[in-house]
Image (tube, coloured by chain):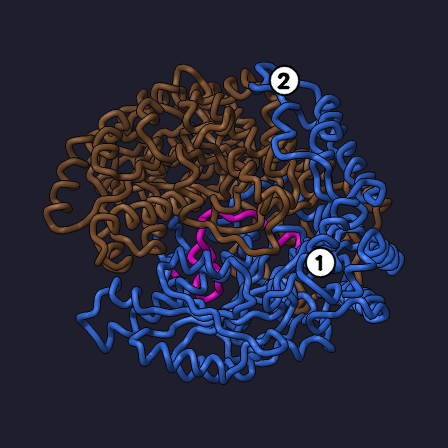
Chain colours: A brown, B blue
């Protein structure tokens, strides 16, 4: 395929994507396929000679689309949103076309520099304390990670290195292995499973700190766990506080946790994967109060800020903490400017901030989205989602067979039928089997709960009304007698 | 921006990308900017209200392009290639448009299933032993990782878990920490720096095994290091063998190393990041002989197989080894099919194979590239690069002031002026300062060496002739006297 054919096919693909998104409501939100459906539809071996683009595009409809869960359907209320916007798609196309690999400043200066500036822009949009920004030769700065899992892992590894160095200063005879075996990390009992994966990797211990009635980790509880662990000879070194948990979008109490962490030399990392985008609205910014105590902060604009996956933004107060944990400098990555120290001063050595070496030009899609929506456009989008979530909550509250299971603060509503878990499991199965809308569950204090997350960019009040009608219809099919129990 | 405007702007972007790639020779391959250039060109704050697309596209030329290192210029010979092809761009556009997140089978069945089948296709293209494939309910299978660093890390962590379990079976009293502190990993003294980063993360020790005159790790050397380490109380558990090292594209001797690893319960991982793509050509497949001894194998189609970054393909013989290391199962990721065990049998639980949870629909670009080039088209592309590399080698050999520093097997030529390192450092600086072509160096046994990597998809013999002329011109500017020395 040469550039001339790409011009033709690329434009056809633009139309295909526009059609897909414009008419997504007509597609069934969750697919009917059974595991293994696709292999039977595809040849056993790749073709020896080139095939025609027309045939491939036909196969997208015949083979791929029947197996797609349509995350951008306005009937999709599962998990959390994943972003998809036209400006982000345009930025990503350009990133692909340029196709540079930004593993060092020299490997494509614009790639590293735009990222640093975009992270400053976004940091200002959520009013992060200036220590987290790279401008004005500070000690902090931001970087794009692939996912929140990676951001937490990077923070945890930096904290591990820092703890080992500190402890070895006072105890020369302790080996790294001995220290690691005594390190303990903390997170909420509502935190995302990725934190557990991260401690498996780091080889440290983890304690899930019990949450209060609002599913929030409080200072007194953390203090108690820390004291017990220290008495048992463990070394507390890391807290992953969560703002907007995956289960029910609850918020840990940073203002209580922060001073304890600072006092105890515990690295405080904040994971606001979903909720972080809301902090661009002044009325939600209070949820981030206490970030000033944190060492690192992360959220996923690829969830709720209209920037397509992957774009997980992470800031640190002292970037030296990250580079100490990861710094490796082979000759083939060196160039003239390295010697000057200028790159580090300017916050341009991002390869030491992450697990992979290679990096795509992901800041382009941030730049496109910020400029084509403007801050006001993004705020409006967040506010619409929150408004619609409250609308759904009100519908639930009007039906006294149901209960709301956690405070509705942003775009997630956790609800259930009053009654047994079994009842709610059957309800959810019936909802998803009907394929009109798509939800996933969670457990809250042993209760099986339905999560209703506002997800699609194009979701409106009418879709919520439809969804609620659909849910209540399900409760009429053989549910009435059980619900009375 | 609505779908109607996206149709217009998307097509303009397609043309912009086509123009960029068609006319890339006219752009200076390496930029003139100094660190920090970009911040001055961009406002301090994001805009409050939306801006026009035309203005953003103008800024791409004004702000971004002056800071881009043009990896796809036919005058780019630095690092290793990074792929960029029109079919891959189309596949990526579609992936962005669908915008699903494939962290579980249910979250988008097509995303997981196409990936598994594409990894089987690619495995067959390079004639991997069938144990590495997922088809026919085997124990193995493949997955797309972001980078080779991540693939090596995942393999190392799985090996670590396996070693801990095995050792604890015989030594119940040994803690995980005690075992980890005695684990030692091996790799070539020519291996990529990412292996060092991976051991920092895993908290284990690493030994760089000395290479022979061809920069290859041999069985006898590995045997010696293992014996010494065991005598010193260490536990050898992991070897990262390299096929196609970053420095000089040398190849470790798998046929000697494999049996030793199998005998010693050492996990053998093979990193063929760059070279792996060449194994689709029967005449280069011999370089992979011995893979039958390996536990895991990885290469980067995003380097040399025309599939845009990121696409690092990894296969394992026993996928249970990976899932044991990473398995975490929260309720919100469960669904009906989980219970059946069918998903695992079909190799569909890829989130346990990697560090992040979320995953893009990256197999679409593989599918597009394999079908639009055909195996023969891809082979032709690899062969062209190898042919051109040999052409460059011949040019170097015809000038007796220069020497070739490592065997030219694929698309990389390591060469230098006979003489001091300083001389070669000046030569490289002059070449890069002239901005006509772009190279990076490496060190081989203390010698400063210039790496000439065949990179661009569109590179032809004429560009090689130009590059060589450019290099020799540099040696005439004040070099003559020194070169005689």
Say if residue A84 shows up in the picture: yes
Magenta region: which residues? B340-368
Residue drawn at (48%, 35%), measured in percent from left and top?
A313
Nearer to me, A485 or A89 = A89
Tell me, yes or no, if residue B463 can be seen here: no
Secondary structure category for the residue under label 1: helix
Secondary element under disc 2, as helix, strand or loop, is loop
Q: Name the residue at 87% across, 60% down.
A: B461
Residue nearer the viewer, A198 or B75? B75
Residue B129 screen position, x and y as percent: 57, 77
Up/down of A133 relative to B378, above or below: above
- How dense is the environment of label 1, judged by Cα within 10 Å: few (below 14), some, or many (20 and up)? many
- Crowding at dot 2, Cα within 10 Å, few <14 / some 14-19 / many 20+, comes out as some
Do marks 2 and 1 share a chain?
A: yes
From the top left corner, tell me how far across and down residue B23 is, in percent: 85, 42
Given the image, what chain letter belongs to the residue carrying mark 1?
A: B
Q: Give above or below for A60 relative to B383.
A: above
Q: Is residue B351 magenta?
A: yes
Which dot marks residue B50?
2
Q: Which residue is mark 1?
A: B424
Chain identity of mark 2: B
The disc, 2 or 1, on the residue closer to the chain's N-terminal end is: 2
Corner quadrant of residue A18:
top right
Work out whether residue A35 or residue B205 is closer to the camera in this orientation and state it.
B205
> Residue A478: which quarter of the image?
top left
Q: Quadrant of the N terminus of chain B?
A: top right
Residue for point 33% across, 38% down:
A247
B91 and B273: which is toward the camera:
B273
- Quadrant that contains the C terminus of chain B: bottom right
Q: Is residue A30 left or right of residue A282?
A: right
Where residue B261 appears, x then y in whole percent?
Answer: 44, 79
């Amino acid at each position: 395929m040469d550039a001339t054919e790409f011009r033709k096919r690329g434009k056809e693909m633009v139309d295909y994507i526009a059609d897909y998104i414009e008419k997504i409501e007509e597609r069934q939100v969750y697919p009917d396929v059974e595991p293994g459906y696709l292999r039977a539809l595809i040849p056993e071996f790749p073709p020896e000679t080139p095939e025609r683009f027309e045939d491939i595009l036909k196969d997208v409809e015949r083979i791929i689309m029947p197996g797609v869960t349509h995350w951008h359907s306005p009937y999709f209320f599962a998990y959390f949103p994943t972003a998809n916007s036209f400006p982000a798609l345009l930025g990503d196309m350009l990133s692909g076309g340029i196709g540079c690999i930004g593993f060092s400043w020299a490997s494509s200066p614009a790639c590293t520099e735009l990222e640093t500036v975009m992270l400053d822009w976004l940091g200002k949009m959520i009013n992060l304390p200036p220590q987290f920004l790279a401008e004005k030769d500070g000690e902090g700065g931001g970087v794009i990670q692939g996912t929140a899992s990676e951001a937490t892992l990077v923070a945890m590894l930096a904290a591990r290195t820092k703890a080992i160095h500190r402890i070895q200063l006072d105890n020369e005879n302790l080996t790294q292995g001995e220290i690691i075996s005594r390190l303990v990390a903390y997170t909420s009992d509502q935190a995302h499973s990725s934190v557990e994966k991260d401690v498996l990797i780091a080889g440290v211990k983890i304690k899930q700190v019990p949450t209060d009635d609002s599913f929030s980790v409080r200072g007194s509880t953390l203090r108690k766990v820390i004291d017990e662990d220290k008495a048992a000879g463990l070394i507390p070194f890391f807290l992953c506080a969560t703002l907007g948990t995956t289960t029910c979008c609850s918020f840990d109490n940073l203002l209580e946790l922060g001073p304890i962490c600072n006092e105890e030399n515990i690295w405080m990392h904040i994971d606001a994967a979903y909720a972080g985008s809301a902090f661009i609205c002044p009325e939600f910014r209070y949820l981030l109060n206490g970030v000033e105590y944190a060492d690192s902060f992360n959220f996923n604009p690829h969830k709720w800020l209209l920037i397509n996956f992957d774009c997980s933004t992470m800031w640190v107060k002292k970037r030296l903490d990250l580079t100490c944990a990861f710094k490796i400098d082979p000759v083939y990555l060196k160039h003239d400017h390295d010697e000057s120290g200028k790159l580090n001063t300017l916050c341009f050595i991002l390869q030491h901030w992450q697990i992979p070496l290679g990096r795509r030009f992901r800041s382009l899609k941030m730049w496109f989205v910020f400029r084509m929506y403007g801050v006001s456009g993004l705020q409006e989008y967040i506010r619409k989602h929150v408004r619609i979530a409250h609308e759904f909550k009100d519908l639930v509250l009007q039906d006294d067979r149901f209960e709301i299971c956690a405070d509705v603060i942003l775009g997630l509503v956790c609800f259930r039928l009053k009654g047994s878990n079994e009842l709610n499991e059957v309800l959810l199965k019936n909802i998803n089997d009907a394929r009109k809308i798509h939800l996933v569950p969670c457990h809250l204090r042993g209760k099986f709960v339905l999560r209703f997350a506002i997800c699609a960019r194009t979701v409106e009040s009418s879709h919520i009304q439809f969804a609620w009608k659909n849910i209540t219809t399900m409760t009429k099919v053989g549910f009435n007698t059980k619900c009375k129990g």
